Every structure is written in C-alpha cells, then in structure tokens.
Image: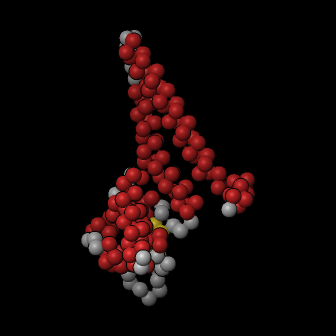
Amino acid sequence: MEFREAKNKFVQTWGALGSQWGINKTMAQIHALLMVSPEPLSMEDIMEDLQISRGNASMNLRALMDWGIVYKEFKQGERKEFFTAEKDLDELAVKIAQERSRREIKPALKVLKEVSTAVKDDKSEEAKHFTDQTGKLYDFVLKADNMLEKATEFKDNWLGRLVLKIMK
C-alpha cells in the first residue's frame, strides 16, 4: 500500500469512527489529518486534502479547538493560520473523556436528578417505581462519571505518573 493510500484510509476510517464518539465525520477527519501530519497544516491544506469548503473547515477546526485537541500555531513570516493536533495519545484520551463528560454526562445527571426527585407528591406504585429506577440510574451514572474523573486525574499525580511510566 502506498503512503498516500494508507494515509487516506486512516483519515477516512477515523472519520467514520468519529460519529461513534459523538462528533461529525468531517471533524474527525480533520483531527486525523492533523494528528498524522508531522508539520502544522493551514486551513487551505486541510480543505485541499479533504476536499471540503472553507466554512466546513473553519467550523470544524473551531470545534476541535473548543475540545482542546487542536491548536493554532503561528509561523513567522506567514499570514496564514496553521493548525496542529494533540500528539500525546494519553492526553488526547483525557481531553476527550473530560469533554464528553462535560457535554453529555453532566447534562444527563442534571436531568436524572431532577426527574428522580420531581414526583414526590404522587404516591402511586408507578411513580414510586419511576423514582426508584431514575434514582438508581442517577447513582450509577454519577459513580461512572466520578470514576472517569478519577481516571483522567490519575495522570496528574506523582503515583499515577509512576504507574504510567512502569506500564510503558
């Protein structure tokens, strides 16, 4: 397989996986392209490689920067903006986990807490079952989110760094 073909296959596959992480295909393709590029790329480079419009590239680059996994880089003497992706895979995983928690898990927890405590006046069996189940679901999702938080903080303490060093 030629390099260009392999690179294209990776970018396309990463793009298809993106929808499973909760991001759109083009956003994931841009991220893939930047992740495997040894040098920062301009928006024009990205548009040309992926055959996408300026608006599409701009919107998705902005979203990737909001996620904290793509950064702007400035090259001296260049007027263009250049972009690069987070290359440290551990850091990338942490940032994605934190962002998904913020965007998906925290809002779900808020709703679960609200609905599990909302029907206190209704004494029917159905209302009691609803309250019990949504309360259990809230507790479970909260524990999962706390575990995710602990796992992403693990890298920041000396013991976590030591364990990671031993594992590598």
Which residue does the image show at 50% across and 36% down from the upper left?
A: 141
User: What colour-coding does the image apply?
Assistant: secondary structure
Q: Is residue 91 left or right of residue 7?
A: right
Is residue 125 among what the camera can see?
yes
Residue 122 in percent (x, y) is at 37, 13
Which residue does the image show at 43% across and 60% down from the upper left?
A: 66
139 relative to 35, above or below? above
User: Farthest residue toward the bottom?
Assistant: 77
| Quadrant housing the C terminus | bottom right
Q: Is residue 9 left or right of residue 138?
A: left
User: Farthest residue toward the front?
Assistant: 1
Is residue 43 among what the camera can see?
no
Residue 61 in percent (x, y) is at 38, 66
Residue 126 in percent (x, y) is at 37, 15
Q: Nearer the viewer, residue 117 or 38?
A: 38
| Quadrant housing the N terminus | bottom left
Residue 140 in percent (x, y) is at 52, 33
> Quarter of the image holding residue 33?
bottom left
